[in-house]
Image (spheres, rainbow, N blue to C red):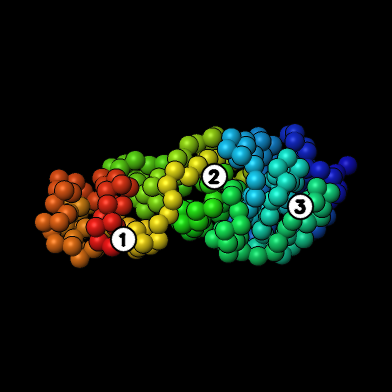
């Protein structure tokens, strides 16, 4: 018999049964607005921690504690983890789950904690609607050196897309400019409860470049302007978005915006700053 004080089992269907038991005890109704789909296959927990352990294991920020199953093992294995949950009822449950491993749960918006400079690593079962904002915040927070992001597969594909590919865009550029990114594993909907309509994809990030506010401060604004005309000639759109004369961006001749590399966009930032 599982209870709220039981350790989340690293087995299946044990983790699914534990999840359903906890939800039933609290009479919890899931909130679609927050994208609440809970991990019920322990492979995701193991892979998420492995993403972090491959670099180190220190000062971890978890966005979206949910029921606390990953939070429990982050604290048990790594310690020094702050888990933030925006849903007050879930935060109460997660607190009960992790108290035996001295975990810290905060009811709040995890985005507010990324830029504090207090954390070295980041982990999240990332809601679709927050993916872009999270990656941008991680990029500009130089103390974050590695991350484990569980994304909807289509978002993960966008993050790793290469210049010229259909999924390539702002998320690809911001993510790839600052991080080495690799897919750890893809998970079918059966790995979650309730089952989402799409698969999940775990992406491991490791920082390769520091954010320089003088150079990169306008990165989001520039990429938004450039990709508002993704099929236009790159030199024309670059001139429009930066105010630079066409002759100063002639090195982009022959390319469409969708074919520009992250490093070419960074060069635009450098010469227009």
Q: Is residue 69 visible?
A: no
- Nearer the observer: mark 1 or 2; the answer is 2
- Label 3 near label 1: C-beta < 8 Å? no
Q: Residue 250 location, x and y as percent?
A: 13, 51
Give the position of the N terminus as an image quadrant: top right
Label 1, label 3: how far apart the Cα atoms are: 40 Å
SS of the residue under disc 2: strand
- Label annotation for residue 131: none
Quarter assignment of residue 212: bottom left
Label 1, label 2: how far apart the Cα atoms are: 25 Å
State the residue position of label 3.
103
SS of the residue under disc 3: loop
Q: Nearer the viewer, residue 146 or 187?
A: 146
The answer to which of marks 2 and 3 sits earlier in the sequence is: 3
- Label 3 near label 2: C-beta < 8 Å? no
- Label annotation for residue 222: 1
Vertical placement of 167 versus 213: above or below? Answer: above
Q: Residue 262 location, x and y as percent?
A: 32, 47
State the residue position of label 2.
146
- Label 2 near label 1: C-beta < 8 Å? no
Q: Residue at x 44, y 43 (%)?
A: 208
Q: Residue 107 location, x and y as percent?
A: 69, 64
Q: Residue at x 65, y 46 (%)?
A: 58
The answer to which of marks 1 and 3 sits earlier in the sequence is: 3
């Amino acid at each position: 018999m599982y209870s709220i004080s039981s350790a989340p089992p690293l087995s299946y269907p044990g983790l699914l049964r534990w999840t359903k038991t906890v939800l039933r005890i609290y009479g919890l109704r899931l909130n679609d607005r927050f994208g609440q789909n809970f991990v019920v296959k322990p492979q995701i927990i193991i892979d998420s921690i492995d993403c972090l352990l491959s670099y180190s294991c220190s000062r971890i920020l978890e966005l979206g504690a949910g029921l606390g199953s990953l939070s429990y093992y982050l604290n048990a294995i790594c310690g020094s983890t702050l888990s933030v949950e925006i849903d007050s009822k879930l935060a109460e449950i997660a607190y009960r789950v992790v108290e035996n491993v001295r975990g810290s749960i905060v009811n709040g918006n995890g985005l507010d904690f990324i830029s504090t400079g207090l954390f070295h690593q980041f982990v999240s079962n990332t809601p679709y609607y927050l993916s872009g904002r999270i990656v941008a915040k991680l990029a500009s927070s130089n103390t974050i050196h590695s991350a484990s992001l569980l994304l909807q597969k289509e978002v993960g594909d966008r993050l790793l897309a290469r210049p010229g590919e259909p999924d390539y865009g702002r998320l690809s550029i911001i993510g790839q400019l600052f991080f080495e990114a690799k897919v750890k594993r893809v998970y079918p909907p059966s790995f979650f409860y309730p089952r989402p309509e799409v698969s999940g994809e775990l992406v491991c990030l490791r920082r390769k470049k520091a954010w320089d506010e003088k150079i990169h401060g306008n990165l989001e604004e520039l990429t938004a302007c450039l990709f508002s005309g993704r099929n236009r000639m790159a030199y024309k759109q670059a001139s429009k978005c930066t105010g630079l004369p066409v002759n100063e961006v002639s090195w982009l001749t022959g390319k469409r915006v969708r074919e520009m590399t992250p490093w070419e966009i960074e060069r635009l930032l450098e010469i227009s700053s």
